[in-house]
Amino acid sequence: MTNRACGYAKSMKYLIDLRLSDSIFLNVDPAEIKFYNLEPQRIYKNYWLKEKDFLQSLTSSFHDKDLFLKRLYLIPGEWDKSGALFCDYPTYQYMKELFEHNFDYLKTKRYQELIVRIENGEVLKHKDFKMRSKEDVIADYFERYIEIFKSMAERGYISNKNNPGLVAIGRNGELIKTSRGRHRLSIAQLLGIKTIMVKVEFIHPEWMMKHYKDDQLSVEVLQNALKDIQSEHRHCNSQNAGYRFSQKVTKNY
């Protein structure tokens, strides 16, 4: 039943995402994404793992579609107050260290850490890779991200709606990084890129109540809310500024 509940919610949200269309994808200044928190995803998943909630929502979805939309998109709680600064998150720190050492990964603490773990017999998992040797660490981790640095510096942030970075919206309209795209966001911030695409997964209901009547939630209301959020976080000059670093990247690697 729990698997059915999560699968049902995921399928329903996918269908509504299709109706929301481009509005769930925001073009924003990456510097505006200052916080990191996975809590809204945990709250969402735990809610749908409850059998009685699944049965109630299955029924209510046919009778109270506004309530169902709230359960899919509006995540209550204090999660937006408990997140950490994104610049303090390990992924950002690893990319920052690589950038500050001019992409000479041999000088980074991260490289030394990973090599020690490899020498101790540990198989390291990163993305879809399993790293068993020093060569794996270099190819599947450091060279991979150096290439992303180079590409983004030369061509800007390449948007991909099939694999977007995910964000949530806090009660004050702040952008909060959740899962997927954390390395890309780190690199965009370090390079000074001015516009990236993200997908909004969740919104704090208090933000919605500040701007819209709570009893009028609909797909159209969500679309308008997302337009407002994008306008708050777009850079005044939407052009990318990553080219400033392209010479540095290509020169040192």
Image (tube, rainbow, N blue to C red):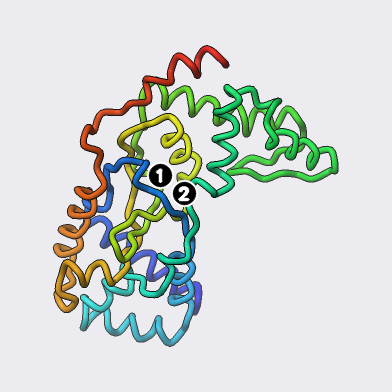
What residue is pinned by disc 2? 180
- Indicate the position of residue 207 as horizontal and vertical percent values: 26, 67
Residue 87 marker: none
Left or right side of 147 for 192: left
| Quarter of image, res 145 | top right
Left or right side of 156 for 122: right
Looking at this view, is 84 or 130 the one in front? Answer: 84
Residue at image location 67% in from the left, 45% down from the top: 125
Mark 1–mark 2 contact, CB under 8 Å?
yes
Looking at this view, is 173 or 53 the one in front? Answer: 173
Estimate how packed mark 2 is, as few (under 14), some (14 to 19) or many (20 or more) residues with alpha carbons within 10 Å.
Answer: some
Mark 1: which secondary structure? loop
The amino acid sitting under disc 1 is: Asn
Estimate how packed mark 1 is, as few (under 14), some (14 to 19) or many (20 or more) residues with alpha carbons within 10 Å.
Answer: few
Inter-mark Cα distance, 1 to 2: 8 Å
- Indicate the position of residue 100 as horizontal and vertical percent values: 57, 28
Looking at this view, is 22 or 205 the one in front? Answer: 205
Looking at this view, is 35 or 68 the one in front? Answer: 35
- Indicate the position of residue 223 as horizontal and vertical percent values: 18, 58
Lower sequence index among marks 1 and 2 = 1
Does 169 appear above or below 241?
below
Left or right side of 181 for 215: left
Residue at image location 50% in from the left, 15% down from the top: 250
User: Farthest right residue?
Assistant: 120
Mark 2: which secondary structure? loop
Residue at image location 48% in from the left, 74% down from the top: 46
What residue is pinned by disc 1? 163
